[in-house]
Amino acid sequence: MSISPTSNQINVCRSNIFKCSLKAFQRHRFTPEAKLDVVFVDEDLNGEGAVDEGGPTREFLRLLMKAIHDCCVFEGHEKARQLALSTEALGKKLYYFVAKMITVCVVHGGVGPHFFSERLFQQICGLPTATVTVEDLHDHKLREQLMRIQEAETTKEANFAIEETADILNVMGCLRHVSKLEEKDSLVHSAVEFIVNGRMRNAHDQFVEGFKTLGLLKELQKNPTVFHDMLVCEEKALTARDLSGLFTVAYSAQGSNRRALENQLVCFWRDWLINIEGLLFEF
């Protein structure tokens, strides 16, 4: 009879957070429900501290999320990542384990990725997604080739552009010549749909499977708005109130001359923050 551990010891090097973490999460006895016991190991393989009172775990989760952002299963804009197709990652169930790591970060430490694209978030939550377009492609060369087909002004130009992209269109099952100009849009849409959704199906399914860890997928699909800001990057303008709230004033004694000057200074400070709110500066 196997007894589940009460904690998961994770030995990590700061220089290779992702690899060390993946090894721990792939461990047969790793239990997502158990607390994390993180030990950072220095270059001489000495533990920085044997007891994890919470500080090492918080640092680990932050570093791990950054490493996940940069790993091979994602591509696209830094603040709007999409899944990238890798047959090697698929074979090693890397999409599953990355989602599992994200889930543990969210549940155990409240650390969210904040870098999912809107489309990826919607796909995970089972929400309707916008119609795909050529702009959704991250392969610049292929995007330019399809745009040449889309922007062709005659059927001759369209078929010439199709011939230039024949090999890849044939692999997608989208290769066909057009006899009417409006047919080019249907061809391009079919190609983009295959690239963005069709060929990514297995990777997407494996990724979603990982979010079943600790029941997070069920909660995501039940309450998507609650988790939106944690998974998707939301650009929020910094307000005067936000900045003012970052500081605590150490006032002098009430009624003193210094206190009167401090009150006036705080007013000047807050007025200045209001005056510059929303302005752009170049440094």
Image (spheres, rainbow, N blue to C red):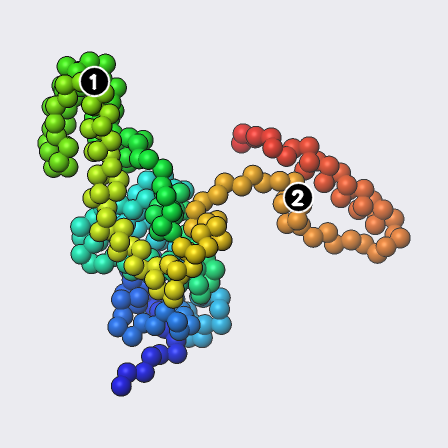
Residue 162 shown left or right of residue 143 in the figure = left
Q: Does residue 121 appear anywhere in the picture?
A: yes
Estimate the spatial distance between the alpha carbons at disc 2 and disc 1, rounded to whole Å. Answer: 55 Å
| Residue 180 in which image quadrant | top left
Q: Is residue 152 above or below residue 106?
A: above
Report helix, strand or loop for mark 2: helix
Q: How many labels does the image show?
A: 2
Report helix, strand or loop for mark 1: loop
Q: Is residue 171 above or below residue 163?
A: below
Q: Does residue 17 appear anywhere in the picture?
A: no
Q: Position of residue 60 (x, y in %)?
A: 41, 62
Mark closest to the chain's N terminus, 2 or 1: 1
Q: Position of residue 193 (x, y in %)?
A: 24, 37
Tell me the residue at 88%/52% (across/down): 256
Which residue, given by chain and number where applicable, does mark 2 sit on? 241
Q: Where is residue 269 in the image (x, y as percent from the top left)?
A: 72, 40
148 or 131, which lies in front? Answer: 131
Residue 182 shown left or right of residue 270 in the figure = left
Assess whether mark 1 and mark 2 are in contact (beta carbons under 8 angstroms).
Answer: no
Which residue, given by chain and number where applicable, does mark 1 sit on? 181
Q: In this view, does 166 lie above or below 218?
A: above
User: What number is the disc on residue 16?
Assistant: none
15 or 56, which lies in front? Answer: 56
Tell me the residue at 65%/40% (across/down): 240
Q: In this view, does 18 lie above or below 173?
A: below
Tell me the residue at 20%/23% (across/down): 183
Tell me the residue at 58%/40% (across/down): 238
